[in-house]
Amino acid sequence: MTGYQQLDAWIDAHFDQQVRFLQELVRVPTPTPPGDNAPHAQRTAELLKDFGFDAEQHPVPQAEVHAYGLESLTNLIVRRRYGAGPTIALNAHGDVVPPGEGWTHPPYGAEIEDGKLYGRAAAVSKSDFATFTFAVRALESLGAKLNGGVELHFTYDEEFGGELGPGWLLKQGLTKPDLLIAAGFSYEVVTAHNGCLQLEVTVHGKMAHAAIPHTGVDALQAAVQILTALYGLNTGYRNVTSHVPGISHPYLNVGRIEGGTNTNVVPGRVSFKLDRRMIPEEQPAEVEAAVRLCIEQAAARCPGVRVEIRRLLLARSMQPLPGNRPLVEALQRHGRELFGQDIPAMGTPLYTDVRLYAEAGIPGVIYGAGPRSVLESSAKRADEHLVLEDLRKATKVVARTLRDLLA
């Protein structure tokens, strides 16, 4: 057999074990918030040890974690050095959004039905803990001479922006790989993605009894005017288009609103959190200034109202770095052979941890196990799932790519 055929055969022979590994990962909940994710890192390290992989555990100091709004966070690095040459990092995140409602399968049950594994993070992105781990194991099974090394980076802060995940590892000088493959889907190689601005807006009015509302200042009415202005901005964003394939236009979403004290009380305080996606062509500082100005101008039309605006996240867009070409070409070549179709290199409207590696000058791409779109996987929705054949084939694609780059 050729080297590629040997890799494929090893992955086929160990695929049941790989699926069981993924099931164990899904069964340990990591809803973020609240973000108590250190137990999952510990369990992952235990499972990796069964494969002969020693995972370095790097706990982020509790003061930093709590200030960030999380409960516990430990990042993992597995280093596999084979000889002189480049280091390729493989990054996936274990934190996920809470399961929400509407599931027909237990969100942490990791049940398999009709060739699909169901559970929160089955697709995004505990699946690629399994993809990357078994791709490395397959690579090492060849016993061939390799030049360079591989690192597994399993982190737990993507849902909050990645600053305490890959960002923290990079700032602490714990890693500086030469190339990166980060968790993604199987039918495209992502080379660029949107940026993201998240703001918390608090509208202060004055509480009053509902029987005498004129004695108060209704914070909710003011918030409605501000939201109307923001949604007006959002309508205009459709006229701003990106030149990056796979990315359309900017957009704004208000994902959480809370306020008021009781039905018979004029609300004196209302807060909401917004998410503004930025296309790669936009400048983050200009975007934030425009959104803040819109909020402040709308609030100024509401007498007696005061607003506070707090930045929660500013994630810059990912721009492709020239050094990513060997990764892109290898993943496309093997993806075409194994999936029987072209694997385009394109952008995505998501934002990811990969931007932090790019900002550190590390060329990277997004590729892993999953369907053609986030929508197909039900990621962040009920009944998130992974087609197991996508996991099998993506693992082969990554293993072959590692062999190409390290041979």
Image (spheres, helix red, strand yellow):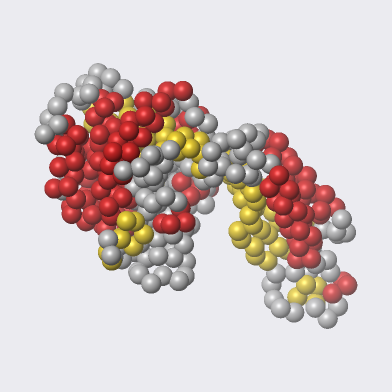
Residue at image location 64% in from the left, 45% down from the top? 250
Residue 118 can be seen in this image? yes
- Drawn side of residue 142 relative to residue 46, left or right: left
Total numbered labels placed on residues in the image: 0
Residue 79 can be seen in this image? no
Q: Nearer the viewer, residue 267 or 138?
A: 138
Residue at image location 78% in from the left, 69% down from the top? 207
> Which image quarter is the C terminus in?
top left
Q: Position of residue 314 (x, y in %)?
A: 59, 41
Q: Is residue 78 above or below residue 380?
A: above
Q: Nearer the viewer, residue 287 or 350?
A: 350
Q: Is residue 334 above or below residue 124?
A: above
- Drawn side of residue 147 relative to residue 316, left or right: left
- Drawn side of residue 406 relative to residue 310, left or right: left
Q: Position of residue 7 (x, y in %)?
A: 18, 37
> Which image quarter is the N terminus in?
top left
